[in-house]
Image (spheres, rainbow, N blue to C red):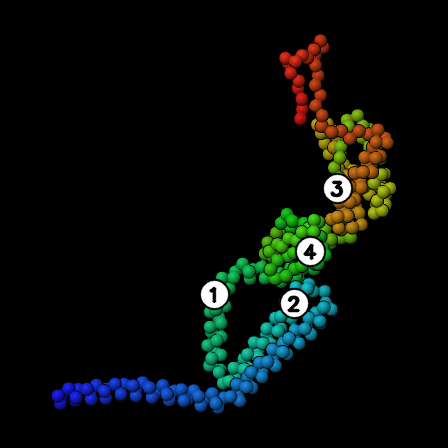
Amino acid sequence: MYSQEKTKNIAENAVDEVVSKGWNPMINKLEGWYDAIIENIPNMIMAVLVFLIVFILSKYISKGILKLLDRTKLQKSIKSLISKAVSVVIIILGLFLVLGILNLSKALNTILAGAGVVGLAVGLALQGALSNTYSGIILSFIKDIKFGDWVETNGIEGEVVDIDLRAVTLKQPDNNLVYIPNKIVVENPIKNFSTTAQSRVILDCGVGYGSDLRFVESLTKKTIAENFDAVSSKNDVVFLFKEFGDSAINYQLRFWIDSTSALQIAQAKSEAIMIIKEVYDKNDINIPFPIRTLDFPKGFEPNSSEGIVSDR
């Protein structure tokens, strides 16, 4: 009986000793943290106030920079990028100031080291997005591509309505919007129709083999010169016979108009087709179309058993 009670007392004493050894240090640690929090309450309040002031200040500075940049000829996207970058830099500096107020300089070194690792991982994961962002910055600084320009790239033609850090937005003649990733635009040729004040209209046509070709050329150039203001004389019109076609002698007509709009170019081409057809009809100039001619030998009389040849 005595040995059982002794064993029990020894076990209880061992448990109490283990609990006291584990509990007391934890209590002491919590008390130390509590005291530290109480002591640093003024610093915490100051840090929160400083961060709020820095955050509000970054907003006003960002807007002020954006207003200053509006006076420049930079693209809208690059103006927004610069203002946002300034805002982020101010907030980061404010964060460093807050950590200094809280006496967390050691934590700052740990944060910077961790940010480097995280930045590397994010950079690898977002390689495509970062490539488009970098390409968007490049496009924003290119003076030959700006809002309102009519361009053609990657087989898509339209008016540039926006250039952001992800894509170039083109408005097509049918009023649809096409978003092309910046990386593709930078890596491929871009044809800008708005770099000059004029655009060239190119029209292909053909006349019959029985036509007087020199008269056709002179009449066509004169007609274009009389109906389009940008063409001062018929010498400004380029008229080139191209080939002997199956049913016509084909030519190409080229002339300039005072516009870079794709719609106005199409309208000028349509107007040229109508006036050329009218003047050709008045002068008995034939514009042939493909036909099939059947020559029957003399004395040939087709009957129902031989059938009829047709072209559809």
Which of the image's four quarters has the C terminus?
top right
What residue would you read off at disc 3? Answer: 202
Label at residue 80 = 2
What residue would you read off at disc 4? Answer: 160
Q: Residues within 10 Å of mark 3 (few under 14, many from 20)?
A: some
Q: Residue at x 55, y 79 (%)?
A: 95
Q: Residue at x 20, y 89 (%)?
A: 9
Q: Residue at x 49, y 75 (%)?
A: 112
Label at residue 121 = 1
Describe residue 104's horizontal placement relative to residue 74 as left or right: left
Q: Which of 19/103 is in front?
A: 19
Q: Which of 89/60 is in front?
A: 60
* SS at circle 4: strand
> Marks 3 and 4, Cα distance to the nearest angstrom?
23 Å
Query: Residue 26 appears at what percent x and percent y?
Result: 36, 85
Whether residue 214 is visible here, answered yes or no, is no
Identify the amino acid type marked 2: Ser
> Marks 4 and 2, Cα distance to the nearest angstrom?
18 Å
Identify the amino acid type marked 4: Val
